[in-house]
Amino acid sequence: MQAETKLSARPGKLYRFLLPLCLIFLNPDEVVAVNMTISNSLIRGSVGGEALLSVRYSSFSLDPPVIKWELQGEKSATVVQSIGTDIVGTLRSEYQDRILVFENGTLLLHNLRLSDEGIYDVEISITDDTFAGEGSITLSVDEPISRPYIHMEAYSVLELSENVILNCSHDNGTRATYRWFKGGKPLTNETRFLLSPDQKLLTITRVLQADDDIYGCMVENLVSNMTSLPTRLVVYRRSSLYIMLSTGGIFLLITLVTVCACWTPSKKRKKHPTKSHSRTVDRSHHKPDDPPKTMEHNGINTVTSLYILQQKEPSIDDSSSNCTGSPELDSPPSYTASPQYTVTPPSTSPVIPSNPYVMAK
């Protein structure tokens, strides 16, 4: 029962395999089949290039062969079908102007695309032959590698720094593999040099002065390989002076931040000049520097005395006492004499009267 189940699972393949054997044993002289050979079952191509799926067949019949190419997938799709070199029917849009079939059944694909990758089945049959020739070829399509470059966050680091990461990057390329070089020598996983699973990233832990060197990476796939430009990693030596300066700078920064956070500007009130409620005597017309006025009377210069009346300004207490009749207000005002000046004595010369009649007397 198990054998019958397995046979029923593959009726087509078993039929194609067992029927020729039965016919050979029954009538070997009348068995006619197309013998097909494939020189290379794996073809590698690049995007934009060409792929030659080469096959050969042999037959005793002189009739032209019927050639059929299919691309395997979830649903097998017919790529091209021809009688000899003449294509039958209309090609699918993705294969327009990109296919050429030769007389021996070989298929040539132009301007390859990534979607062309897969397994191609070929079948060649001839009317007079009982069995057709069958075979398959695997086509892989890759995109060429563009020149890679090494990317780092900083190209100069301080000695004993942690986790310096070198990234080998490139714009184009499929199924790429990576290799790293230091000073022209290949790098492998070591204690301080760690490679990612795909070897695209190189991590240097705890950088030493000996790591100051030139680094490079190579990217390759099945159709191309490229090497990056050399990149130098500069490692500066850590000194005790640097540690002191960095520690002091951090302490100073913390101090300044603390002072600025705690300090608030003081608000001082401006003192406005107080207005005096006392009355002042306008002395703009009396200048103390002016000399005293002199008058001439009968030929004698006399000095007039100036008196300034000083009147006491009434205050609140005075006004209240005024109502009760204070004796201070009943007293006469006081006067202050101006500074006394010496009177110039008259001249000793005789006075001549202007009137002549006076002389006659």
Image: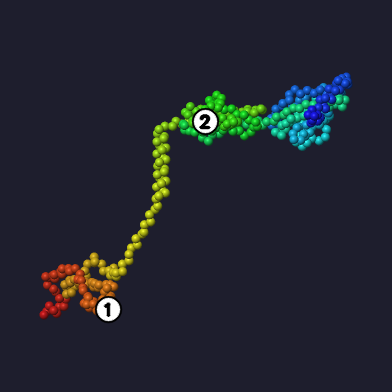
The residue at which mark 2 appears reads as: 204
Picture layout, residue 15 above or below residue 314: above
Q: CA distance from mark 1 to mark 2?
A: 106 Å
Residue 306: x, y in percent? 21, 71
Comparing 170 with 162, the one in front is 162
Q: In front: mark 1 or mark 2?
A: 2
**Residue 63 visible in the current orientation:** no
Residue 258: x, y in percent? 41, 46
Q: Is residue 47 left or right of residue 126?
A: left
- Dot 2: few (<14), some (14–19), or many (≥20) neighbours within 10 Å? many
Residue 171: x, y in percent? 62, 34
The residue at which mark 1 appears reads as: 323
Q: Quadrant of residue 282?
A: bottom left
Callout 2: helix, strand or loop?
strand
Name the amino acid, label 1: Cys
- Say the numbered circle drawn on residue 361: none
Picture layout, residue 351 above or below residue 182: below
Colour mode of the rendering: rainbow
